[in-house]
Amino acid sequence: MSIHEECGVFGVYDPHGDCARTTYYGLYALQHRGQEACGIATINDRELSFHKDVGLVGEVFSADALDRLGGTMAVGHVRYSTTGGTRRENAQPLTIKYVKGTLAVAHNGNLAGTTELRTAFEYRGAIFQTTTDSELIAYAIAQERLRCRSVEEAVCQALRDLRGAYSLIVMSPQKLIAARDPWGFRPLCMGRRGDAVVFASETCALSAVGAAFERELDPGEIVVVENGGVRSIRENCENASSHMCIFEYIYFARPDSVICGQSVHEARRNAGRFLAREYPVAADVVIGVPDSGLDAAMGYAEESGIPYGTGLVKNRYVGRTFITPGQQSREQAVRIKLGALRSCVQGRRVVMIDDSIVRGTTSRQIVSLLREAGAAEVHMRSSAPPFVSPCYFGTDIPDKDNLIACRYSVEEIRALIGADSLGFLSLDALHQIAPEAACGFCDGCFTGKYPISV
Amino acid sequence: MSIHEECGVFGVYDPHGDCARTTYYGLYALQHRGQEACGIATINDRELSFHKDVGLVGEVFSADALDRLGGTMAVGHVRYSTTGGTRRENAQPLTIKYVKGTLAVAHNGNLAGTTELRTAFEYRGAIFQTTTDSELIAYAIAQERLRCRSVEEAVCQALRDLRGAYSLIVMSPQKLIAARDPWGFRPLCMGRRGDAVVFASETCALSAVGAAFERELDPGEIVVVENGGVRSIRENCENASSHMCIFEYIYFARPDSVICGQSVHEARRNAGRFLAREYPVAADVVIGVPDSGLDAAMGYAEESGIPYGTGLVKNRYVGRTFITPGQQSREQAVRIKLGALRSCVQGRRVVMIDDSIVRGTTSRQIVSLLREAGAAEVHMRSSAPPFVSPCYFGTDIPDKDNLIACRYSVEEIRALIGADSLGFLSLDALHQIAPEAACGFCDGCFTGKYPISV
Amino acid sequence: MSIHEECGVFGVYDPHGDCARTTYYGLYALQHRGQEACGIATINDRELSFHKDVGLVGEVFSADALDRLGGTMAVGHVRYSTTGGTRRENAQPLTIKYVKGTLAVAHNGNLAGTTELRTAFEYRGAIFQTTTDSELIAYAIAQERLRCRSVEEAVCQALRDLRGAYSLIVMSPQKLIAARDPWGFRPLCMGRRGDAVVFASETCALSAVGAAFERELDPGEIVVVENGGVRSIRENCENASSHMCIFEYIYFARPDSVICGQSVHEARRNAGRFLAREYPVAADVVIGVPDSGLDAAMGYAEESGIPYGTGLVKNRYVGRTFITPGQQSREQAVRIKLGALRSCVQGRRVVMIDDSIVRGTTSRQIVSLLREAGAAEVHMRSSAPPFVSPCYFGTDIPDKDNLIACRYSVEEIRALIGADSLGFLSLDALHQIAPEAACGFCDGCFTGKYPISV
Amino acid sequence: MSIHEECGVFGVYDPHGDCARTTYYGLYALQHRGQEACGIATINDRELSFHKDVGLVGEVFSADALDRLGGTMAVGHVRYSTTGGTRRENAQPLTIKYVKGTLAVAHNGNLAGTTELRTAFEYRGAIFQTTTDSELIAYAIAQERLRCRSVEEAVCQALRDLRGAYSLIVMSPQKLIAARDPWGFRPLCMGRRGDAVVFASETCALSAVGAAFERELDPGEIVVVENGGVRSIRENCENASSHMCIFEYIYFARPDSVICGQSVHEARRNAGRFLAREYPVAADVVIGVPDSGLDAAMGYAEESGIPYGTGLVKNRYVGRTFITPGQQSREQAVRIKLGALRSCVQGRRVVMIDDSIVRGTTSRQIVSLLREAGAAEVHMRSSAPPFVSPCYFGTDIPDKDNLIACRYSVEEIRALIGADSLGFLSLDALHQIAPEAACGFCDGCFTGKYPISV
């Protein structure tokens, strides 16, 4: 519950206009990927406009702002910031003026080796105003553009020098360009709605705007939309591989999204089924921690034959402005966020499933809450394996000192959280939760092995 | 999905202080009962303070405001306003100065015959600054106080003249007084946390603040807390009856609340079971419309043996600031609010369960969404009977012209919403969904028969 | 510089509508009379609307709000609150529903003996939601209305029981009623703009809305506007006297206003002339403390023949949000508020005139600022006599412990503020500064003698 | 009244810290130079922090923000934006990371030939995120820094390539660098407060923070503060000349500022004296349009012997949020902004002095206001010559189509504004209004002749 990803992206070309509004709805569907800042940039008659700020999509945009933005093309972004404070300056899309006019850049992911790249640019006289990868990417494109005949060629060349995760949307006055990194870390899909072409981090955003899913972009692929025509540039696909972040299936993505052909909801359900096989237990009810543990709980129930129940209710109103209880009662914060359903758990042996265990604090509080509500036994199952290693590609995993699985054995963790038994999904099972996915996976945070040397 | 109740109330006496903060967390747990305005009034050393405004609990209160409020007693309120605009003046608790000092009044429910009562007061020279029942109640108490020896006696006398629904919390500089109307329309319960005494509309608010449920107030009962002592005044209980709003079970209350001994979640699950018996159908999956249709869907699945599935995902970020799509695409708003899970419904015969059907618009859109996602058949079941009559006691039911069940037969409604079959819970079954409830029910909105002549 | 008055009022009847906007501009012109809260109530087709909040006129009202308010009649109010915090609830106009419908009440002044009156009402069962006199007045009117045939008669009767200062505007769905207390403490004038009738605390508000001044209301007079017709009720004028707050001339009113036939600017200039006669001094330049000391400085210069100069420049941007310097440098706050003009004062003997001396702190800082800028001598003159007594009628004068003139002799004050000489306007001269004023004066804050026993 | 300048700058080195607060007060004193955005950047232990936004100084900064900023060095900026909308992105200081670490840049003025410069940078791969000159300057410094041994040398080299107006403050983690363009267009002065060194656009900001004026920077001079030591770099002074914007004296600067040794107040008074000699008239009173016309009016009165009077009172509350009257009554907006003093003008022949006439609209309205207040004659005098040409160096003068003096003769203008006579200060007199100024002037907006070819 405390692992975050950085960002979601959305782009649309629609000759009928009002692209800001389409993007607004698309960003609403991607809000779960970033809640700290958001923005939309549009093109009207080759003129770039934008509006961005810290806050949720519903806070940042007014109807007036959307009307002003209009647009026959648009790029949108929702941001979660991993490091430091929430700086308004870092809100995206980044909009720049460069040798060939204007560009808007929206980026999801995390580049590796950026310090070297920044330094290299600085040694050529560059100045940086933000700490975002987007600014680095914009520089790379601007410098390549001096040598290239088109913006898409510049994008293609610039991306060659970048290592790491990016699902990128770049907009020039005439072109909308989407690109995925050659390792295929982050999802990026494409859809159609009549004449309109839509790009989004997840398929749920296509559905939200009424667009039909067409396909996922391939690792390394660049797609250019110009005057309604769509072209694919595959130069960077040659040495591409496929390493979709497996945590997208477990936690990040919305359950109604489909990534690389695999329903996210079904993948979670599968994780639950594997957990039931790997860690069977005699119990009376299977419950999930809402929202992200519910799907796996259903899978566990199905596979085990133990009835599925609703044991915990989430308070839908606890958000950014929530004032946490003082020191002595901080542990009770979970009471406000989650309510236990006594009628479900009282006197019963409960299997409780959550998406993962990071620090263990929340799990301990939930176990305690269930016991107070009368649970006879609490058997915890995590639909992710133990976190043992950082992520360099856009997931905000705490350092090892704060990862409970780096410091304790499974039995020790069980004791710490106060459960009667505990099971983490095995790495073996993990690789089988997405059988329909036409891709490979990155599981670096669970294994310490990464597709790129870091 | 468009029926609202007016308000939730919370009260606490705690000699250890910080009652504003306890109330803040209590109101968070009751936020689902009213999202338009909220407020907290406290007593510190017999001095009354208060803070209230339009907005959610998380928007209205800062940590500073809570610190300023402090309190060894507090009354809180969340408000949903049925008529007219959202007027800041109508936010509660109402705080007044009267012949014996100060009072704070928080009210959940709706009085009947208030026009006559207001007029009667006005003919004695009264002025009204709000349109709330709380002001009327405050007047009644103030006028009775001229004749009575204590504030609780004045409350008792004043309530005798009132007809309708009220769960009331009144706070004087020394006493915290909770009262329920003699018809028992609205829930009001009491709990303890060490020395502290807590009142709340629902038990979920007791849990949120770590208080143990003690009991529900009886219809007509008045409970007085003074210097930590608790007394019950039962004078108004004599002619009391019991008519708990049955829609609390179906929609209003939080599923982890227990009302009159009946788990709300179980009542909804029961409704689903009855629906399965009353309207069986050959189908492949049972899904619920989140959040309030999910429990009944589980019950339907259990009873029917058809697998329970997740067919719809709710966007958690769509709130007050959401800008609805323009005229031509308004029907598509449901796409942003709900995402269909293709992997669950494609090629399947789907039973879809919602808590009720009011205008029918949303149901039609959901059916259409499911068909687009590939559902072979869509069989809709409503866990409430058809709405045919207004509510005079605090539920915001549209007028008959806007109630689809007042204008069309079930078969016509089915055709209008585009479902393959349609079933409403029968009145007979309705009365059996809460078998553990030690109370009678008001089902006036489904039958047109009310416990009080209106 | 730290004496405040409570409130300004504005009312307009205009058959051509848009009265909210007219009132908005009128309140802008009266903003100097109260900067903490403001409000406008309007009548459209006998329906009452209102909008009020804490803040300046320019902060509280949007173009949308004004459009919604519209109005063929309107009442407006700007508020300065003397006691306790700034409570939104106390913003005016007060709007009520009573036996005959609705009323809006806006009040400038301060009633005496309100505790008794409140208690009397409370003993009849009244409840009070604010601490404003307006609510008391509304009650009095509502209770009289039970016996009277018209609202204006009720106003007339109600006012008979009130003692103290009030310039009042009351609006019913059909009538606009303006009234002045029988002691004539606070100004209230009337003007015309075509068919429209306008009431305002000061004539500068008439000018702002393009209305021609017609006349001041007489002490005790009530003027009723109904369907464009204007009637005067003079029943309460019989025992009326005339005691205009003389501090209106010295400080409160805007210099371009005319009160009781006397230009405020000229009155201040006269005060300066008298100061020159009473406290002549050999000097090189006469300067005023902006803004309220400038007029008197001109008068002093004229009478003395010493050149008038600009010695201090006021920072126009220091307002409510200004963060005052920390403890050690608080005395330097004056540096940010006022800039000394070295070219004017360097090496010169300076006569510096301010409207009054309350605590002496500011005066000391200004003297010091002028010496730093090179002034050879600083001779201070106050265009008000020493404050020695509180005001019971609407002026926020500190208690005697904080009035420098209650604790020190003139010579001691001179030494404390560091001036070379010091003179306060004599009471004798004070009574002659407004020779054109067709009224008597209240000078209670300078003499301790009040027109009403207090 | 509708000519604006772009920006004011402030910088401070103070080993005792709290530089953000010092800058806050300095910016308050410079607020008249720019009201659209403001910002402060600070250095604490070599770390750069900043806070900036659209709005007034009092709106943008909270006490918390100032405490967070702290600082042993700080740079501040107030901004008026000439072109396009108010973009938050353009708020200053600009803060960047470049090859040698971080820089903050604040700029007052306007560069010429920036299009070429931008293009040159873009052809080396630069990207621009704002439209400010500051970003261009930052690039220039960053690129020079590759070749130079110190940041001050880089600043010195970079400025050699820039043509136009700049008063610049640059802050690196260890150095505070102030610089003035070699043409001396915009003022920039330096002061001391104990160990602290202060730079500001105007001396009034030095006074506000209690700093003693030391000297003006010379055209082309660069001053470096490092560890409390102050060094001057005069390399760019060699070909420097001196062309102080003469409109600083007439309108921009605060009257209590001293520019190049000349009191601004006295310069305005001198302008009035010259007007009296050049355009004498038989009249009864001389009045100024507040605030900027008052000083010249005093000078006219002195020279002519006609009494000085207060004929117009300015409403201090009309600001950004003011809702202007609708189309039909727009001409009456002046009534709300200015009140005429009937007692001063009625029946009199009035000389009315304003700082300049741009479009003529306001002047016409003021003349009309004075006539309504009974003025027998209105003789207008402008203390600036007619505007006939644009400004390329930071003053927002309308295009020629909107300059009344470009389209009409003086006699025609007189008729248009409805005055009885009209006089503009002659160019000859203009050059004599600042006799103490140790500098030359730019009067390009009055003559079309500029110190730099444009």
Image (tube, coloured by chain):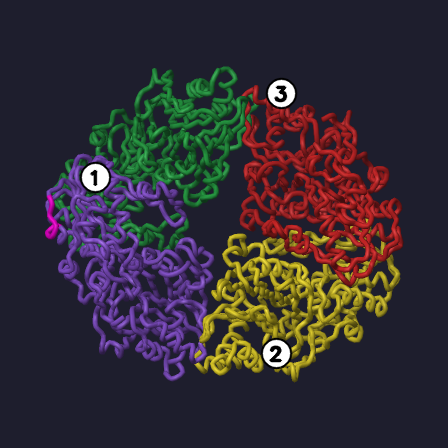
Chain colours: A purple, B green, C red, D yellow
Contact, CB < 8 Å: mark 1 with mark 2?
A: no
Q: Which amino acid type is shown beneath numbered disc 3?
A: Arg
Which of the 4 image quarters holds residue A76? bottom left
Q: Position of residue C165 (x, y in %)?
A: 70, 32
Q: Which mark is residue D233?
A: 2
- Name the residue type under label 1: Gly
Q: Residue at x 57, y 19 (%)?
A: C123
Q: Is residue C279 left or right of residue D453?
A: right
* Residue A84 percent coordinates (x, y): 40, 60
- The answer to whether dots 2 and 3 both sit on one chain is no
Residue type beneath disc 2: Ile
- Please determine whether, in this image, residue C128 is positioned above or below residue C343: above
Residue A133 on image: x %, y %? 37, 69
Q: Is residue B45 magenta?
A: no
The number of numbered discs placed on residues in the rendered structure image is: 3
Which residue lies at the image location 66% right of the left edge and 78% below the top edge? D183
Marks 3 and 1 sit apart, C-alpha to C-alpha, by 61 Å
In this rendering, do the residues under marks 3 and 1 share a single chain?
no
Q: Is residue C141 above or below residue A57?
A: above
The residue singled out by tag 3 in the image is C147
According to the image, label 1 marks what residue?
B423
What range is drawn magenta here? Answer: A276-281
Is residue B406 something one can see in this rendering?
Answer: no
Residue D332: x and y in percent read 68, 54
Q: Which chain is indicated by disc 2? A: D
Quadrant where the C terminus of chain C sits is top right
Circle 2 residues within 10 Å: few <14, some 14–19, many ≥20: some
Quarter location, residue D371? bottom right
